[in-house]
Amino acid sequence: MYYGSIKSCDIANGTGVRVSLFVSGCRHCCKNCFNPETWAFDYGTLYTDETTAQILKLLKPSYIQGLTLIGGEPMEPENQPVLLELVQAVRQQFGNTKDIWCYTGCILERDLLAESPYRCNVTDALLREIDVLVDGPFVEEQKSLTLPFRGSENQRILKLREIL
């Protein structure tokens, strides 16, 4: 897996101050996406064990509320195994003291819980580790600058711990 960037103090992609990992690879290719360079699966830097160590270090300060997985598309089957290892490492080191958000252009019920090209052998395990899922593709015609933590009105903020 490749990633485009890591933001160490992100306040736009979830509550509080967060560490955000912008993964590479996205087949949704939403019109007027804010991050189209991350559509390519080989964009940016190769993710390694050192990347996990860096993210864990960035999460240590008490003012960091949690980790956000964003992209690109975290739920591309090529990305899910690496992200599962990352979130398991976060849980092992921090328990539930750091929350995990994930942004996806997938729709939970249609693409992640039912048979689809996005489901793979680790999807269920990854979803169990995510606290908040922002789902749905960005839709230019439903764009709104007033929505907290999402770009278009069709996108939902789902508390997965309550749903699953």
Image (cartoon, rainbow, N blue to C red):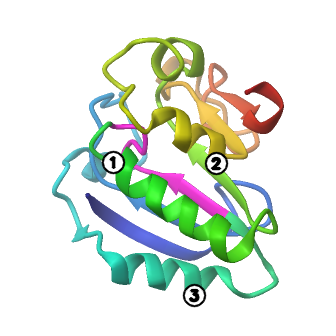
Expressed as whole percent of the image width and height from the top left, the position of residue 137 reads: 48, 26
Residue at image coords 32%, 64%: 4
Q: Which element carries disc 3, helix, strand or loop?
A: helix
Q: In this rendering, would 10 be left or right of 15?
A: left
Q: In this rendering, would 116 be left or right of 87?
A: left
Label 1 to label 2: alpha-carbon separation: 15 Å
Above or below for 97 versus 161: below
Q: In this rendering, would 120 be left or right of 70?
A: left
First in sequence: mark 1 vs mark 2:
1
Residue at image coords 48%, 64%: 86
- Can you tell which of label 1 and label 2 is closer to the viewer? 2
- For the N terminus, give its image quadrant: bottom left
Circle 1 residue: 79
What kind of residue is marked 2? Glu
Residue at image coords 55%, 69%: 89
Magenta-tinted stretch: 67-76
Q: In this rendering, would 83 be left or right of 159?
A: left
**Residue 10 sits in quarter:** bottom right
What kind of residue is marked 3? Lys
Label 2 to label 3: alpha-carbon separation: 19 Å
What kind of residue is marked 1? Asn
First in sequence: mark 3 vs mark 1:
3
Expressed as whole percent of the image width and height from the top left, the position of residue 136 reads: 54, 25
Q: Which element carries disc 1, helix, strand or loop?
A: loop
Mark 3 surroundings within 10 Å by alpha-carbon count, few (fewer than 14), some (14 through 19), many (20 or more): few
Label 3 to label 1: alpha-carbon separation: 21 Å
Above or below for 24 versus 111: below
Expressed as whole percent of the image width and height from the top left, the position of residue 160 reads: 73, 34
Q: Is residue 39 magenta?
A: no
First in sequence: mark 2 vs mark 3:
3
Expressed as whole percent of the image width and height from the top left, the position of residue 153 reads: 67, 23
Circle 2 residue: 129
